[in-house]
Image (spheres, rainbow, N blue to C red):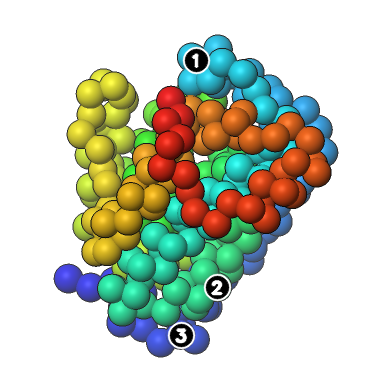
Amino acid sequence: MSTARQTESAFRLIRKAIGDRAAVRSKVTRTARTLGNLAGGEVERRLHSLRTQGLLDRIPNRWQLAFGAWDMLRFVIVPAAADYYDHQGIDFRFHQVLRGLDDPLSIADPTGLFADFETISGHVMQVVHLNPIYDLQLMAMWPDGLQRFEDEVAAMVAGTHPRAGTIGAIVEDPTYHSRLLDYVRAFRRDPKNVAPMVRQEQTLRADPHFANAERVFATVPGYIAWCNALPADLAGLVRHRARLARFPLEFGGV
């Protein structure tokens, strides 16, 4: 079994990722809502919701969140994705183009803390995740978030989701959505004991620095713990960025 991402031309994939007029209007609406989140107090509300759930005990400031997101990108997300798509025989840069066309915000906010619910859910469905637990913890910020997401993944499996066409231009694994649906259902039943749905990496986990970064950034509590460990002032954060070339082995996180 193969997917459109593996068999269709670049031109057809671009057309599919953009979608029809309704899809474009939906992207514009999601973008506007996310920009509103950046300007308003929605992020603080979400962080307080996560603290109420016991996922964090101290809220970092926005500069710490931003530099923590930068570290998440450079130490885990980008190297893991580049490694994975290289072994899949997929052009990593073109893959990011398709993701951006499907949802411009899916690659703009790696933390998901500023994103609209539909952006987070779409992101999890468009990318074969290294580990989706972080995103499921994010969706729990909405009272019915996990139920909504389960329904969306079920619709993707059934082929009835409104974004099935645009997301279908990106996902290269034909089994991903069915496996994701099983995982979401198991996570909802028992989030503490569900077997992790971890994407296999061919080389990177042999590097202990990457392995520790992956462990820390795999969950919302881990990401927040890293942010809280960073300097609280901008000058200190700039020095941190300049000096830290590899993720530290000694950071235990949560």
The residue under label 2 is which amino acid type? Val
Cα–Cα span, label 2 and label 1: 36 Å
Q: Quadrant of residue 232?
A: top right
* Camera sees residue 98: no
Q: Can you tell which mark lies on residue 97? A: 2
Say left or right for 193 vs 85: left
Tell me the quadrant of the picture where the N terminus can be found.
Answer: bottom left
Badge 3 is on which residue? Answer: 10
Q: For this rendering, which residue is in front, 63 or 166?
A: 63
Single out the mark in the foreground, 3 or 2.
Answer: 2
Mark 3 crowd level (few <14, some 14–19, many ≥20, 10 Å Cα) = few
Percent across and percent down for residue 21 are: 63, 66
Whether label 3 touches label 1, CB < 8 Å? no
Badge 1 is on which residue? Answer: 53
Q: Earlier in the sequence, mark 3 or mark 1?
A: 3
Percent across and percent down for residue 93 are: 50, 76
